[in-house]
Image (spheres, rainbow, N blue to C red):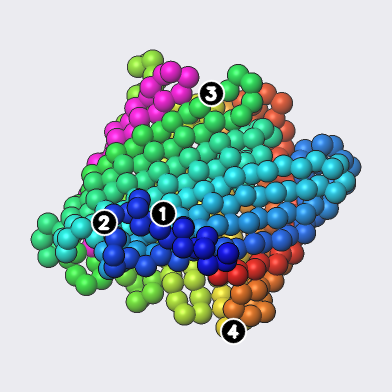
């Protein structure tokens, strides 16, 4: 019986991926995470004073595989959270699919889709979406084609889609459509220079706002594992009524290091974003830091920090530090350790603090602040 379900799963994958038929190799993935946590977020505990203990179970089913030209990775995960104090039980859903296809030596296609339906909006991968305590639906899709025009010049056409809906009465979904075209020229082995045009269409409550932007880019390999990416340029925003319009600066800085013992990710920027679930578009300041340190083959530590500020586009309302009702801000801090008991079992301990204030635009919203202390057991049978 154990081998039969794998056989049927692999057969189904072959049918839906005829381009990789024959030489393709597919491998099912199963992971179960059992977590015991203390969460002092009173809203999630239905007002239970002092927070409460919770048990979280997360089964994750996935598949990886491909051939020499196709690589595919897909998963579905369910988060079952049981609160011991109030007895409340919630079920969240997450799913994703990522594919990389090398069509020719000069042309490749990359695509990715992620879908979330969560009762805790602060768990979403984009900061600033937790504007209320209601469940939230979030979807994100990316499609791009990269062609090598010459030995030094790459041209990339991309499209990004985002959708957000706060699942409460009277709320409507917000959408963001972002096609783009960019070119990167490798001037040296370490330095590449880029130029990008980006269109943004923001749809909310049947009204469409738009933005056009251009940006210059620089990608520089500081060391073999460390790369710096910088983009900067102006964005022109036109509101749905045609009256609200203005310029918003776009600046992003990313630093990534992937080493044998240390991984570092830094991102800082100011940009125009949509699909927030409460407005057509908002300007956003953001900063994030991610660290992962491997001490031995069995033991490693990880940490992350992020900060954001959002305000309605195109106004630059900087009064957030003096209590502006039109700007939201927040931060998140997390850290933990992991110990691999063996190849299939690992134990983790983690601490998280999440805070968000200044959300007066949302009815019934308050200071969304919480602390989470968790211990996890992660089992990967195969």
User: Dot 4 corresponds to which residue?
Assistant: 296
- Element at badge 4? loop
Q: Nearer the viewer, mark 1 or mark 3?
A: 1
Residue shown at 67% from the left, 79% from the top: 341
Neighbourhood count class around disc 4 (C-alpha, 10 Å): few under 14, some 14–19, many 20 upward: few
Q: Nearer the viewer, mark 2 or mark 1?
A: 1
Left/right placement of residue 80 relative to residue 344 reads: right
Image quadrant where residue 128 sits = top right
Of the image marks 4 and 2, the number of the one nearer the N terminus? 2
- Gap between marks 2 and 1, in whole Å? 14 Å
| Quarter that holds the N terminus | bottom right
**Where in the figure is residue 195, as x and y percent of width and height?**
22, 49
**Where in the figure is residue 104, as x and y percent of width and height?**
17, 60
Q: Do labels 2 and 1 touch, CB within 8 Å?
A: no
Q: Nearer the viewer, mark 3 or mark 2?
A: 2
**Where in the figure is residue 218, as x and y percent of width and height?**
28, 58
User: Dot 1 corresponds to which residue?
Assistant: 12
User: Dot 3 corresponds to which residue?
Assistant: 172
- Gap between marks 4 and 3, in whole Å? 49 Å
Magenta segment range?
A: 192-216
Find out whether residue 204 is within the magenta segment: yes
- Gap between marks 3 and 2, in whole Å? 39 Å
Neighbourhood count class around disc 2 (C-alpha, 10 Å): few under 14, some 14–19, many 20 upward: some
């Amino acid at each position: 019986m154990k081998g039969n379900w794998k056989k049927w799963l692999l057969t189904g994958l072959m049918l839906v991926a005829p381009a990789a038929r024959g030489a393709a190799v597919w491998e099912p993935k199963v992971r179960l995470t059992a977590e015991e946590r203390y969460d002092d977020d009173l809203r999630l505990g239905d007002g239970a004073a002092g927070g409460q203990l919770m048990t979280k179970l997360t089964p994750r089913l996935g598949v990886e595989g491909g051939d020499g030209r196709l690589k595919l990775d897909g998963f579905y995960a369910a988060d079952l959270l049981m609160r011991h104090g109030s007895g409340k039980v919630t079920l969240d859903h997450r799913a994703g699919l990522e594919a990389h296809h090398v069509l020719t030596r000069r042309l490749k296609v990359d695509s990715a889709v992620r879908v979330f339906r969560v009762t805790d909006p602060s768990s979403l991968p984009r900061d600033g979406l937790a504007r209320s305590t209601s469940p939230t639906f979030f979807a994100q899709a990316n499609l791009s084609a990269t062609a090598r025009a010459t030995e030094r010049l790459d041209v990339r056409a991309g499209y990004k889609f985002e959708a957000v809906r706060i699942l409460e009465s009277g709320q409507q979904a917000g959408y963001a459509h972002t096609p783009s075209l960019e070119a990167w020229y490798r001037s040296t082995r370490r330095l590449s220079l880029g130029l990008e045009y980006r269109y943004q269409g923001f749809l909310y409550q049947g009204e469409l706002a738009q933005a056009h932007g251009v940006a210059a880019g620089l990608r520089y390999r500081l060391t073999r594992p460390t790369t710096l990416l910088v983009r900067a340029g102006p964005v022109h925003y036109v509101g749905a009524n045609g009256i609200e319009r203005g310029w918003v600066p776009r600046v992003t800085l990313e630093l990534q290091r992937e080493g044998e013992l240390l991984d570092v990710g830094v991102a800082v920027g100011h940009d125009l974003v949509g699909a927030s679930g409460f407005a057509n578009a908002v300007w956003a300041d953001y900063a994030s830091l991610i660290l992962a340190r491997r001490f031995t083959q069995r033991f490693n530590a990880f940490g992350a920090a992020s900060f954001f500020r959002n305000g309605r586009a195109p106004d630059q309302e900087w009064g957030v530090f003096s209590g502006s009702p039109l700007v939201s801000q927040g931060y998140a801090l997390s850290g933990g350790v992991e110990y691999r008991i063996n190849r299939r079992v690992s134990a983790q301990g983690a601490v998280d603090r999440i805070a968000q204030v200044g959300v007066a635009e949302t009815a019934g919203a308050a200071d969304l602040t919480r602390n989470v202390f968790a211990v996890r057991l992660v089992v990967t049978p195969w």
